[in-house]
Image (cartoon, grey):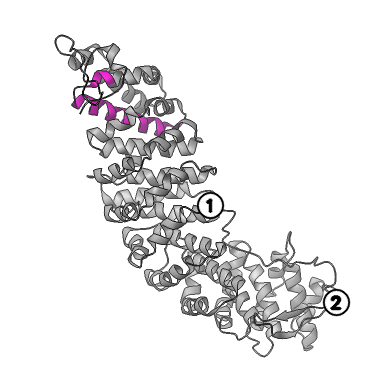
């Protein structure tokens, strides 16, 4: 199977194997999601706001309600690692607390925290043991903070935390009466869940989900609710395997409530969670649709904040990779109304993903293609082809090629009448062989459509005047055998002397103009109007 055939199978077209199309679509989505999101990190460290190399001023650790856990005043310098090892298991409670706090402060450095050295010193077992010190919430808090930052490290460092049994202890801390302790447990579990599917499942199997759901509906403290939302998003993340569908079903009503929140960070992380849920099979795409999340997602497509727009667009884009009914839901909800502005967005990544989403709509049925045309999106797509960055141009080209593959003749020829040929044909010069093959496929579709209504001469003139014919001829010398064969076949079928005779049997027809101003088949001179009569 050629690369071209592989790409074509990534879209929803009649006659294509559904399961294979889904598998290939997943690979395509991975490519679209390679860029790391600065706004959405899988793991987060709790950085101390003061210089950890200087003694702390007297402070207190407070609950969210303002009550004091315990006086945390300290002016002592940070212990050395050797001193920490000496005192962390000692009999003096103050020395123990000081050792744990020193560990936490070392790990809270903004740069180069010594996570590896802490692990090598075998301090994790002691820190985990103090998570269960319910009679000493300050010690719990300091230990939880330290472990949170260890879990923010590499996969191996996170695994060391999980192996120590910390997950179950953190789930226990979710039910603490001290909100600072609870928040630190939420944070730690989010770091662990964000590390990968096995760690994520360890968190859900430890019983974290129902407690997090309960917290999300009872907490009024905004920073705490933000952390809960972020942790929930990490519980929806990662594949191979995906989260259990029962977990997703349990979390979705809470995600719907969080999505309705007016806080930017909460909305953003809720959207990311939904993007992970919908980056999957049709069955999982249907789950958020069934509980009515789509209207809010469509609304967020219009947000002026790209932090919100990006995951909302990604989620909607995932939905339109589903079956025709799921794609239709987006159309009927008015989702296409947002795409005109998204295609003009200042962020290239948003333009690219908007074009990618539209390419899956034009890969749908003819009524969905018509909805795309009726929404006035052809012009903005052409503009992306003309002046967008290369990645956006590629996705815009797929919008056009998919339209040419599944549309009716009138629909297929509309992009030609709108002036698509020049920017579309320019992609024949690109170095990406798969894109060249895709454009060749689209050109063939356009030429065949014109031929079916006996207006091939108009189309060949468009191809020639745009410079695309010259590029086709140059492709006969391409190093890729499939490309030069495809280019040669197009030239032979549509641009040879035999093709010209077939297009104009007998004497040349007299050009005529329809009442709408469209030319029917006529001479070369008249054909330059580039209009088709249907």
Query: Which of the two discs, 2 and 1, labels the residue nearer the N terminus?
Result: 2
Which element carries disc 1, helix, strand or loop? loop
In the rendered image, the vertical position of residue 330 relative to residue 241, given as above or below: above
Magenta run includes residue 442: yes
Residue 392 placement, left or right of 506: right
Q: Which residue is mark 1?
A: 304
Please tell me in which quadrant of the rendered image residue 439 appears. top left
* Residue 43 drawn at (x, y percent): 59, 63
What residue is shown with label 2?
Answer: 76
Q: Place residue 292 in its image quadrant.
A: bottom left
Residue 102 position in % (x across, y down): 77, 74
Q: Position of residue 188 (x, y in %)?
A: 60, 72
Q: Residue at x 41, y 26 (%)?
A: 428
At a point 61% along the width and 61% down the height, the residue shown is: 154
The boundaries of the magenta stretch are 432-458
Question: Is residue 301 or residue 166 the one in the foreground?
Answer: 301
Eyeballing the image, is 272 above or below 430? below
Up the image or down, 131 lies above or below 158; here it is: below
Q: Is residue 364 visible?
A: no
Give the main secondary structure, helix, strand or loop, of the magenta stretch: helix
Find out whether residue 318 is within the magenta segment. no
Q: Residue at x 71, y 66 (%)?
A: 47
Relative to residue 28, is residue 236 depicted above or below? below
């Amino acid at each position: 199977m050629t690369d071209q055939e592989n790409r074509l199978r990534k879209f929803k077209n009649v006659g294509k194997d559904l399961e294979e199309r889904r598998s290939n679509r997943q690979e395509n989505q991975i490519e679209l999601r390679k860029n790391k999101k600065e706004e959405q990190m899988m793991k987060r460290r709790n950085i101390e706001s003061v210089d950890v190399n200087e003694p702390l001023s007297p402070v207190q650790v407070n609950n969210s309600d303002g009550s004091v856990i315990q006086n945390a005043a300290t002016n002592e310098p940070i212990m050395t690692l050797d001193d920490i090892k000496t005192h962390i298991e000692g009999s003096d409670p103050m020395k123990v607390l000081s050792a744990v706090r020193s560990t936490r402060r070392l790990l809270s450095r903004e740069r180069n925290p010594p996570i590896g050295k802490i692990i090598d010193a075998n301090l994790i077992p002691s820190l985990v043991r103090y998570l269960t010190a319910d009679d000493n919430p300050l010690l719990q808090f300091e230990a939880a903070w330290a472990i949170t930052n260890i879990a923010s490290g590499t996969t191996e460092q996170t695994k060391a935390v999980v192996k120590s049994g910390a997950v179950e202890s953190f789930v226990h801390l979710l039910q603490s009466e001290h909100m600072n302790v609870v928040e630190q447990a939420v944070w730690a579990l989010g770091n662990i869940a964000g590390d990968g599917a096995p760690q994520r499942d360890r968190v859900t199997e430890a019983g974290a989900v129902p407690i997090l759901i309960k917290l999300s509906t009872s907490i009024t403290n905004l920073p705490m609710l933000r952390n809960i939302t972020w942790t929930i998003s990490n519980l929806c993340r990662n594949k191979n395997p995906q989260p259990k569908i029962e977990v997703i079903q349990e979390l979705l009503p809470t995600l719907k409530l969080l999505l309705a929140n007016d806080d930017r960070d909460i909305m953003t992380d809720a959207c990311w969670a939904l993007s992970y849920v919908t980056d999957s099979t049709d069955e999982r795409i249907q789950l958020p649709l069934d509980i009515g999340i789509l209207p809010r997602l469509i609304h967020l497509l219009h947000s002026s904040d790209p932090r919100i727009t990006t995951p909302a667009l990604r989620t909607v884009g995932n939905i339109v990779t589903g079956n025709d009914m799921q794609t239709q839901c987006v159309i009927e909800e008015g989702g296409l109304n947002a795409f005109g502005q998204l295609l003009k967005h200042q962020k290239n990544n948003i333009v690219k993903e908007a074009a990618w989403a539209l390419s899956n709509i034009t890969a749908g049925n003819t009524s969905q293609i018509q909805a795309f045309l009726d929404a006035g999106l052809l012009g903005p797509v052409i503009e992306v082809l003309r002046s967008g960055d290369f990645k956006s141009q590629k996705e815009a080209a797929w919008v056009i090629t998919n339209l040419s593959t599944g549309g009716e003749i009138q629909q297929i020829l509309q992009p030609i009448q709108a002036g698509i040929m020049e920017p579309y044909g320019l992609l024949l010069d690109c170095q990406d062989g798969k894109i060249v093959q895709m454009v060749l496929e689209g050109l063939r579709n356009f030429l065949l459509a014109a031929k079916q209504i006996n207006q091939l001469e108009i189309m060949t003139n468009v191809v020639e005047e745009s410079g695309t014919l010259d590029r086709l001829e140059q492709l006969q010398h391409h190093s890729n055998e499939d490309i030069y064969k495809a280019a040669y076949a197009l030239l032979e079928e549509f641009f040879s002397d035999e093709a010209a005779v077939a297009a104009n049997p007998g004497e040349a027809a007299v050009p005529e103009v329809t009442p709408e101003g469209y030319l029917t088949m006529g001479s070369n001179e008249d054909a330059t109007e580039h209009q088709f009569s249907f």
